Image (cartoon, rainbow, N blue to C red):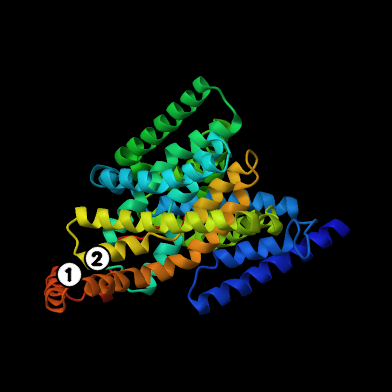
Amino acid sequence: MHDTTALLIELGAIILVLGLLGRLAGRVGFSPIPLYLLAGLAFGQGGMLPLEASEEFIATGAEIGVILLLLLLGLEYSASELVTSLKTQYPSGAVDFVLNAVPGAAAALLLGWGPVAAVALAGVTWISSSGVIAKVLGDLRRLGNRETPVVLGILVMEDLSMAVYLPILTALLAGVSLAGGALTLLIALGTVGAVLYVALRHGRLISRAVSSDSAEMLLLVVLGLTLLVAGIAQRLQVSAAVGAFLVGIALSGEVAEGASSLLTPLRDLFAAVFFVFFGLHTDPAAIPPVLFPALALATVTTLTKIATGYWAARRAQISVKGRWRAGGTLVARGEFSIVIAGLAVGVEPRIGPLATAYVLILVILGPLAARWTEPLAARLTASRAAPAGAAGTMDAVDAVEPAGTAGTTGGGAVPASR
């Protein structure tokens, strides 16, 4: 009875604090992720008030949080949209990988962490936070801008890449042989291909089988199916997160919309628990030694993400202003970086503090970069050019932008979180 009482008190206190921090972040206009991480640091190893009774429950909740994050992300896309993105956005995805994964891998090798940690840190620096980016696009009223589909296309490519990357990382972390790793990758690729094929050909039948007029039944069936598939995927060493993402892709139409609205509050709750859990297992005293590498890595990958967005928008024949806006929007890192680091801390414990500091920096810098990259680039460009020539150039650039796009709210679905 005493253990149960302590568990309830700790959980109640944690959830209440998370709610207050979320409200504070909403008023300030930033993502609550850094505040959740700081809360975990405050109450975890080496923190002010270590938690004991609720640690096991929080660990389980963190696993569910990752699964729900990926499920809701999959529900945002249909199989046809993913196939279209693969056909049109793969060059941008390749540039994104080279420019942003290589700095992370190089940093891990320079720090002497070994090849497995290099693969993990490459993922940390590679993946943008679609949750933060979605909020920024809405706050800045850019959902209807011409560059927004380019940004979303890159995010979709990153999501699809995770279906291949996570099984590879999981296999490497488990220390399997080359043959075992190849088998895991083949299983992952085969599973993704099979799900996309079934979703394209028989997506309506699957959605009809899951559909229910009762919100309670729909919630139970979708959540139960997701946890079951995630568990089976984990057993096959494909990654529970990938299994949840594929379930989301397989559902479409009204079922996807209904399930998304029902599961969003659960996702927000358990995702917050996940970030707290990651912070709980990161010693605050371990962050100062890696703060300089985190700052250096954040600086380099801020520039490489801006270059990625600029190149992709230029390829789509977006104006110069739109290119800079696309690049600045992609800067934020967040939940996926923490997920990857959480998988890798068993092999290289120092990756946890580095990833925490890195995400804290970029989740704060990301909204600022989205807002100020284009004006700053325009000012620097204008200062280098002659006044008359600069004015003529910018007038020509502005003519490319469609009138009134900045305030519209169309432009397709924005990924909910990552």
Q: Are marks 2 and 1 in contact (CB under 8 Å)?
A: yes
Q: Which residue in the protein does label 2 denote?
A: 322
On the rendered image, what quadrant is the N terminus found in?
bottom right
Residue 4 locus on image (x, y percent): 82, 58
State the separation of the CA atoms marked 2 and 1.
Answer: 8 Å
Q: Measured from the top left, where is residue 18 in percent x and y?
A: 63, 68
Up the image or down, 139 lies above or below 247; here it is below
Horizontal placement of 274 versus 81: left or right?
A: right
* 56 shown above or below 395: above
Quarter residue 319 falls in: bottom left
Instruction: Give percent across and percent down for residue 204.
Output: 33, 45
**Seen in the image, is 272 located left or right of residue 397?**
right
The residue shown at (60%, 31%) is 174
**In the picture, residue 380 is in which quadrant?**
bottom left
Above or below, 178 against 329 in this view is: above
User: Mark 2: which amino acid?
Assistant: Gly
Q: Residues within 10 Å of mark 1 (few under 14, many from 20)?
A: some
Of residues 386 and 273, the one nearer the viewer is 386
Outermost residue on the right side: it is 2
The numbered dot on residue 401 is 1
* Residue 296 shows in this picture: yes
Residue under the image location 37 percent in, 59 percent down: 330
Give the quadrant of residue 375.
bottom left
Percent of width and height locating residue 131: 45, 61
Q: Residues within 10 Å of mark 2 (few under 14, many from 20)?
A: many
* Viewer-proximal residue among 413 and 259: 413
**Badge 2 element:** helix
Residue type beneath disc 1: Glu
- Between discs 2 and 1, the one toward the N terminus: 2
Q: Tag 1's secondary structure? A: loop
